[in-house]
Amino acid sequence: MAREGIDGFRLDVINYISKRQGLPDGNKQIGEMMHYYGIEHYFYGPHLHDYLREMREQTFGKYDVMTVGETPGVGIEMSKQLTAKERKELDMVFSFAHLESSGHSRFDVYEYDLNYLKNYFIKWMKDYGNNCWMSLFYENHDNPRMISKVNQHPEYRVVLGKLLAMIQLTLKGTPFIFQGQELGMINKAFTQIEDFKDIESLNLYAELIQKMPEQMAFQKILSGSRDHGRSTMPWDDTENGGFTTGKPWIKGDEDYKVFNAKSQMAQENSIYYFYKTLIAMRKANEALIYGEITFVNEKQKNVLTYYRKSAEKCFYIECNLSSKFVRRKQSSKGYKRILCNYRGENKQLRPYEATLYICINKPTN
């Protein structure tokens, strides 16, 4: 009889475990800006590293498991202190700075700029160090769906979902795929505030309608609510997406009739199969996991291009980060195209095009 095991642990807001002696009051100005008080005293507390090392020594370190810490507010330098291999604290952290474009918060009504994501990943890939290992993710239970944040036009849903998969599964680090992301799930089409269950969303709405028209407040909640990531999983095209024959805990929409697990698994050109293909390629090629990463054309807006290289193989990844046609910067001569989110070829990069090439010849140092 098969036995289940544990591969690892996610540690919720783990950087908050150390508090300053006496629990001092927080700064009023910081509290008003953050909407909660005292965080400057505990988001990176005085004994954080002591506690993490003790926890690892007494628990995780005794087993073949990995740890990933949820660490809001922690940037790259603090992350190095938490995850560097020689420090023996955490294996990885979830840093959230890339989930919103610069200057925006989760409840802003705007289109996410993938150039910001590009610059974020380039910085971490270059500066994080070989003794640290990065987590790669876009979505979780506290955030809206990434496709909806970037571009809500139905025309781009599939190619955009595949573009995000290409980036996530060819960068250096461990990909974390949130439920439904592999199906190309988007934000739910809630139509009234009563559709929401998330207490954060409901409380914020109550505050916002004191300051602005109800429709404007509703649009802000619709843009950033955690309920988008907490909706039921669409297994098939039957009522409620096959999730339940009863009444689901949260209202859905009609999207499950097309984008569900059963239909995605039946289509070889689906987002699901794109993820499946990329995961298989990653497992079969160490260059896509541990290989050296080299970015090119860094200054060109709307283009993300890089190489993944090992002693045996070399891959080239070419991505268009916009809904416009973009001129290709690199010649693919000497490389074979092995995966693309478009059929056929084009002299220009098509909207949100993502292509993976492999070097025909063995790479040279």
Image (cartoon, rainbow, N blue to C red):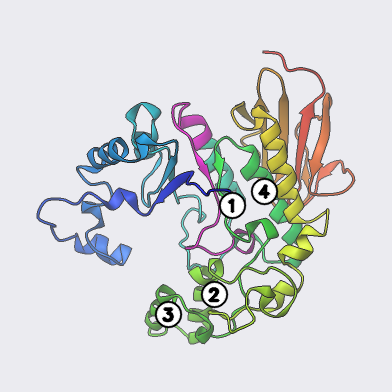
* Quadrant of the rendering where the C terminus is positioned: top right
275 inside magenta stretch: no
127 inside magenta stretch: yes
Q: Main secondary structure of the magenta part?
A: loop
- Mark 1 to mark 4 CA distance (whole Å): 9 Å
Amino acid of disc 3 = Leu
* Farthest-out residue, left: 22
Disc 2 marks which residue?
A: 222
- Mark 1 to mark 3 CA distance (whole Å): 27 Å
User: Mark 4 or mark 2, which has the lower sequence index?
Assistant: 4
Disc 4 marks which residue?
A: 165
Location of residue 186 by image quarter? bottom right
Residue 225 visible: no
Q: Nearer the viewer, mark 4 or mark 2?
A: 4
Q: Residues within 10 Å of mark 3 (few under 14, many from 20)?
A: some
User: Mark 1 or mark 2, which has the lower sequence index?
Assistant: 1
- The residue lying at 53 percent from left, 48 percent from top is 3
Q: Are marks 1 and 2 in contact (CB under 8 Å)?
A: no
Which disc number belongs to residue 177? Answer: 1
